[in-house]
Structures are given as C-alpha cells and as structure tokens.
Image (cartoon, rainbow, N blue to C red):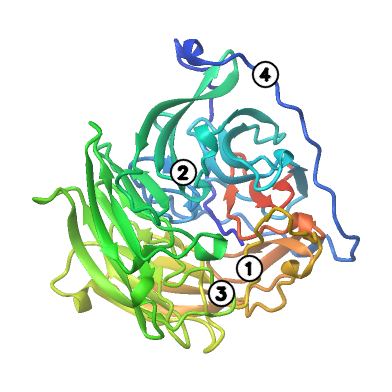
Amino acid sequence: MGLVVALTGLLGLTAYTGKNGECQHAPVYTPFPQKGSISNSQSLDGPAFIGSSAKNKFLKSQFPIYPKASLMHGDGGNTGNTDYPGPLGVNTTLTSGANTINIMMWGADGSLTAGYANASVGLPPPRGLVAVDPATYQINAAWYPPDNETLGLAYMEYMQDTNDILLSTKEGNVYVVHRGICKGHPFFRITRNINLKSVIKPWELLLNTMYDTAGNIWFTTGGIIGGGDPPQNSSTFGYIKPDGAIVKRRVKNQMVENGIAVSGMDVYMATGPSGEADTSTSTGYMWAMDATGSSGLNVKWKVPYDSGAGGKPGEIARGTGATPVLLDDKFVVITDNADPKVNLLVYHQKTQESAEEQLVCSVPLFEAGKSNNDNAALAHFDGENFGVMIQNNYGAPPVRLSSPGVPFVLNGPWNNMSSMAGGMVRVDVTPKGECSDTERAAKGEYVWYLAAVDWLTGKTTYLYRTGMGGTFNDNWSEGTLGPDGTFYQSVLAGVIGVKDKK
C-alpha cells in the first residue's frame, strides 16, 4: 500500500568509490549469491496495461528538510514526495528480485540501502541491513545487530551527508552504522551504540530514532499493534546528546504507534490511547517538542484529538494511523481515529495561544462508517497551496505475519482486497490555513497493479500489471522512487521495479 509523489527533475549523479582510509575498516569482501526474479504464484487473466501514458508535468521542487535524510516516508518531514522522476507508462517494463528487502533508503550518490528479512534461516527471519544494487537487486553487503536483537526496520534513517544509518532494536539498543566503500564494494560497520535498556520500561519497545540538526538523537518507545507489537501502557521519549547524556520523559496510558517528524530542532510526535485511557471515547495527543528549556526537553504544544472507539476493519493502530507530515515550515498534519469518519487534522507548527488556535482546520474524510487511514499522507506545495493526499484503508486485510509452526497459504484470503472501501482524498490547504477537499477515486484490480494517479486532477492515468498471486502482495510496505525514474516496491517475495524504456 505504498504511496509516493514523483516530482520530475533529474539529478546529476557521479560515481562514488569511497573515501581515503575507509578500507582499513572494511571486512574481507565476500560475494553474495545472486537470486533470480519473482515468479507469479497464480495464473490469471488480466490486462498488462490499462489507461494511457501520462504527460510529463513538472511540479515545484520539494521543500528542503534538515538534516538531509532518506526514510520510509521520504524525508525527515515524511512528505512522501521526491524530486526524482517516475514512470509515465511509456514502454514500461517490470523487473524483480527475490531478495526480501523492505524500507528502501537512498544515499546522495544514488546508492540503495534497505532493511532485509533473511527468510533462508527459518522463522522468524533475522532482520538486517543490506546494500542493494538498484539495477539488479543483488545484495552486496549485509549487517545484523549483535545477540539476535530485533531491528525496527520501519523507522530507520539514512543520513545523506555522512552515509550513516541510524536505527534501533526493539530490545532497546540504538546503533549508528556507517556505509562505506572499499575497492568498489560497499560494507557496513558500527560507529556508535547506545544502550537504552535502563531508560525504558520492561514492557516498552524502542520504535523511533531520528537526528536533529544539533546532532541529538531523538527516540520514542512504542509499536505497531497491527504489525504484531503488544499494547504498551506508557511511552518514553527524549533524546541522546552527542556526548551520550540522555534527556527523557514518560507519559502514561499513551502509546506512540507511528514515526515522528524532525525539521531542524523541532520534533513532532503523535500518541494514541493505551492502558486505562483506551476506552470507547478515547483521546490521543499531537505533540511538538524541542531540546530547550530548564529540563532540556521543551513541549512546545500538546493538543488532544478524537481517537474514537477503535476496532475499525483494517485498523492497525489504536489512535492515529498517520505519521506526522510537515507542510514545509508552516503546518503539520495527521488523521484522527474519530467515528463515523476520520478527519484530516492540520496544525500550525509554530506555537499558538491555545489548543483551539493550534488546530488550523479539521476535514472529514471518506464515507461515514467506511472511513479509516493507517498511512502517512502525501504532501506537496505547488507554489500557491499545499496539497495533502490521504488513502482510505477501511476494510484492509491485516498485515501478514510469519509465525513458526503456523501453515501459510501463499494465495490465501489475506490477498483479498475486495473488502476495502477504497479511495483517496486530496485536501488543499492555503498558506493562510483555509482547507478544502476533493474526492479522488483511484480504483485498482485484484491482479496486482501499479496505479499512476495525476497529482493535479486525481484521475488514474494508467494501471500497469506487476504480478499475480500472493508473491506480489505488498503487505502494507511502502514504495519509493529511485534517481533514474524507477518505482520500487517491496512485495512478499522480494522487490519489483517499474521503469519506462528510453
């Protein structure tokens, strides 16, 4: 269910061979075995292409977010947009590789680093970090955390100025792993390890880690309940200073269930109800923080939102299902979990006089009783207005989880998306804070397709068939665009790439 906005505009790339002295830290290079492409697990009828090719429409370049980083939702503001081009449906081709990579991050040199589930060694598969050739999907280097800890792959951060990857384990360790190059071969090495096990509670899992521009590492505990994490009746959040000192705060009966956003020194976080606060009329909170104040952690503002009764079909989070998304340096958006419709909530980034004034607008989304969102919005500023596009996940099948000893039916009902209400909505927000919404109806087919949706009109321009059967199910994974215009999507059996032929 990955979404990404392509902003046409090519980047100039140069070959990167490694800095002087990096080879002294590199292990002996060992080639990884090459895996083949992904095969269809069903033989079905379905047109290979529906619609017509799109015209190349140049959109305004993305707003710079610092530190410069690549993450699941694009950048530190989670905008989901990029200046890379995308396939237009012109002589479009499909490639695939049977390496089960997930959460793809781009270096400034065009290198691809991804999370990896090594299914060849049993269940649950060990999670690692891999360097991937974006053209062949060949794995050229790998790193795994010590002591069989569980990497939290969803919210890794690739620092584009240093080629450092910031990531954490659910058990409470924070790692900074450097990606280097020696004699043309990539490698990984740990440059920093911070143990937070004494900082977080035994029932809490480490979820987020992100840098601010002062070099502080912000962290939160939490989890994704629909992704297999247990409910937690508290959340610990704070930051690690460059000298290793830790500043933290804990909140009871609230749980972080998504990523966070960081721009400069400002941090944005949403929590959902848990523990005693998880009732049929629950409240979650949207937070803005920075590393100032007498305690070293300043909550700039904290605003409640409606979490509803919970239990919507397709729901994977108890509170908001949306990672906070920054609209340049003006606004920040999430969705709530209200009944009978979820709402897009637009907040001022800058502190206002009251909670009521902090909220710019609230826009109801989708049809009553068939409304849910469990993904970050897409956002882009066209020079006049901010466009925010939200996907309806109501009725989505659950995340497929691997369990030892439990039979798995590859082409089973977990592939059936017909229960989804479907649809997308775009809400336009003016710089003055005026909001309006327009329904977007992008309907897919049961055979797996890449859908190209015109950002300006909301119309589905084309559908390109990517595969058939459970092997091509994206299982809630995010997609990404590469520097050469390839759209990459993690699927159950590996990764696919869709690209126009020149």
Quadrant where the N terminus lies? bottom right
Judge the density around disc 3: few (<14), some (14-19), many (≥20) Cα neighbours within 10 Å. Answer: many
Find the distance from the CA under tag 4 to the CA under tag 2.
26 Å
Q: How many angstroms separate mark 1 from mark 2 (CA)?
A: 23 Å
Looking at the rendered structure, the kind of residue marked 1 is: Pro
Which mark is first along the chain, 4 or 3?
4
Give the amino acid type for the residue marked by disc 2 in the picture.
Answer: Thr
Which residue was labeled with disc 4?
A: 30
Q: Residue furthest left?
A: 294
Q: Amino acid at mark 4?
A: Thr
Out of 93 and 189, give the one closest to the viewer: 189
Q: Is residue 434 visible?
A: no
Do tag 3 and tag 2 residues touch (Cβ < 8 Å)?
no
Mark count: 4
Whole-number angstrom distance, CA of label 1 to CA of label 4? 38 Å
Q: Viewer-nearest of labels 1 and 2?
A: 2
Report helix, strand or loop for mark 4.
Answer: loop
Residue hosting label 2: 169
Circles 1 and 4 in contact, beta carbons < 8 Å: no
Residue 136 is left or right of residue 28, and the answer is: right
User: Looking at the rendered structure, which numbered label has been put on residue 398?
Assistant: 1
Q: Is residue 297 left or right of residue 96?
A: left
| Direction from residue 215 to residue 133 in the image, left or right | right
Name which residue lies at 73% across and 63% down: 463
Q: Residues within 10 Å of mark 2 (few under 14, many from 20)?
A: many
Real-space Cα separation, disc 1 to disc 3, in angstroms: 14 Å
Q: Percent from the top left, x then y, of residue 462? A: 71, 64
